[in-house]
Amino acid sequence: MINTILTVMYVLIGFMMALAAIGSFQDKQNPARLGTGTFWTLLAITFAFGSYIPSAIVGVMIVIIGILALFKQIKVGHVEAVDIKHATAAATHLGAWVFMPSVVLAVVSVGIAQFTDMGGQVGIGIGAVVSLIAAIILTHAGTKTVYKDTQRMVRSVGAAGVLPQLLATLGAVFTAAGVGDLTAKLIAGVFPAGSHLGGVILYCVAMAVFTAIMGNAFAAFAVITAAIGVPFVIAQGGSVAVVAAIGMTSGYCGTLLTPMAANFNSLPVALMEMKDEMGVIKQQAPLAIILLVVQIGLMYFLAF
Amino acid sequence: MEYLKLLGIAIIVIGFTFKWDTTAVVVVAALATGFLSGMSIPDLLSTLGKSFVDNRMVSLFFLTLPMIGLVETNGLKQVAVNAIQRLKKLTPSRILNLYLLIREVANVFGISLSGQVQFVRPLIQPMVQAAAGANQKLTDKQIELTKARSAAVDNLGNFFAQNLFVASGSVLLIASTMQSLGHKVDTMQIVTASIPIAIVSLVVGMIYNILFDRNFKLKGDKKND
């Protein structure tokens, strides 16, 4: 039952990606429209039929996506912007009701996760469908509007939208290749496992530092959790949910401190024509340090 | 050489540091790791493909995009802007704190605003600057401070409440990664474990903002009421 619903959900995502593929192929203003269209087509296939085609073929598709990315052939292109006039008129008309579908999504998905045994993922899927229906009723949107908005959203999310899944894939490949075990062995040579507090500090600080270096907490999470989080904290008896959740947010302390996270720390400098390139980071630094210390404490007390 | 397979980590670190195309970097790192750990090419491709398909749950948030697109075309941003504009005549810290609260609550419902572009630049920072300058002429340094702080508050509210939404990219990534690492965990457990830091970040941020008011003369505060 759960697997059937999940399969249907993945087919739906595949369908949405196919719409993005059509939109990308038709986008005459995008110099990389063939590459971008191919990118969405391949993704659509892996989502809709991933469970039925041989893994090696999916692997080849991922490699092709990597090659397209390497040669800069995946671009968002020209995506129609939101019609401000229409949005302003609708805002006056709807008022706070415009938030209703988002609330429906949160309530339905959490409700299903909590009160049925179908789990969080099925909850998200059903929540998404119910909230979409709510939004359609609320805005009296026709098929054409839904098509246009879906296509617009998926295409603007672009390659960045599949990055989390690719990073999770990388984490799985690391595990299959034994990278986690090896790094754990290396670190254990310098830093013996066993101390709860020591392991927690090592993991949280490593998450922050690696995120600061790479500018991306998601990428750091896949690497550092395999190498440090699991052997030094979880294997010592730490609660998986607490360690993983706080590990990720410890990484965000690194994001607050690094010019590598350009979207967050350099973009506002440019937007507001600030003089000090590091101005935003300077305001964030005290917060980042306080929150990192707090999280080390939280993980230590809540995980064991 | 067993250690060669660690090259994948090096590729990720170097690639992200030098801002090479992220998709390409991740795929190359995965291929290098598998290859250097002695997998045959067919094995490597199968592992890659199987891992990708197994991790499709991370991309479940795509399902929410049609709804978000619809409410966006129907004035989501405009309604939020109208609500925030009613906060005129407040101190800088109160504007910042209300925005921080709104940002965190919005995150709980999975509404991710593109804060810096849509709110901080056009709305929050000008309001903070106006409130700070109500009783004095601001120096360039003070104006710069209002800009930096407004941007910082947006990031704070964005980051630490993200995991309160079950379908957020970060919660799904955590669940999926932990499953691949052999420690299965439910998405709702991750959300629950993220509640303390969301609350702490809100409280710490609010205190930090109240201290921010000391940078300006706000004694006329009461006269305005």
Image (cartoon, rainbow, N blue to C red):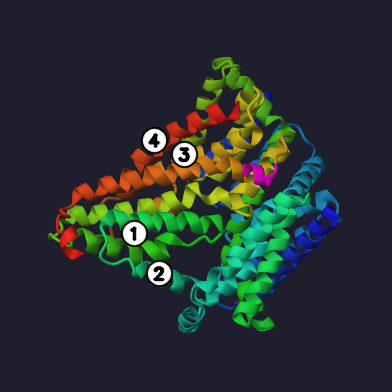
Distance of label 2 from label 4 (alpha carbons)? 33 Å
Front residue of this view, candidates A238 and A272: A238
Question: Mark 3 highlights which residue?
Answer: A213
**Amino acid type assigned to the residue bearing label 4 in the image:** Ile
- Which three-letter amino acid code belongs to the residue tagged 3? Ile
Residue B80 lies left or right of residue B51; in this view the side is left
> Label 4's element?
helix
Q: Is residue B60 at least partly visible in the picture?
A: no
Same subunit, labels 3 and 4: the answer reads yes
Q: Chain of mark 3?
A: A
Quote the CA–CA distance across marks 3 and 2.
Answer: 38 Å
Q: What residue is disc 4 on?
A: A289
Q: Residue at x 74, y 50 (%)?
A: A119
Q: Position of residue A215 (x, y in %)?
A: 48, 45
Residue B215 can be seen, yes or no: yes
Q: What residue does disc 2 label?
A: B83
Q: Label 1: which residue?
A: A270
Subunit of label 1 = A
What residue span does the magenta drawing correspond to? B186-190
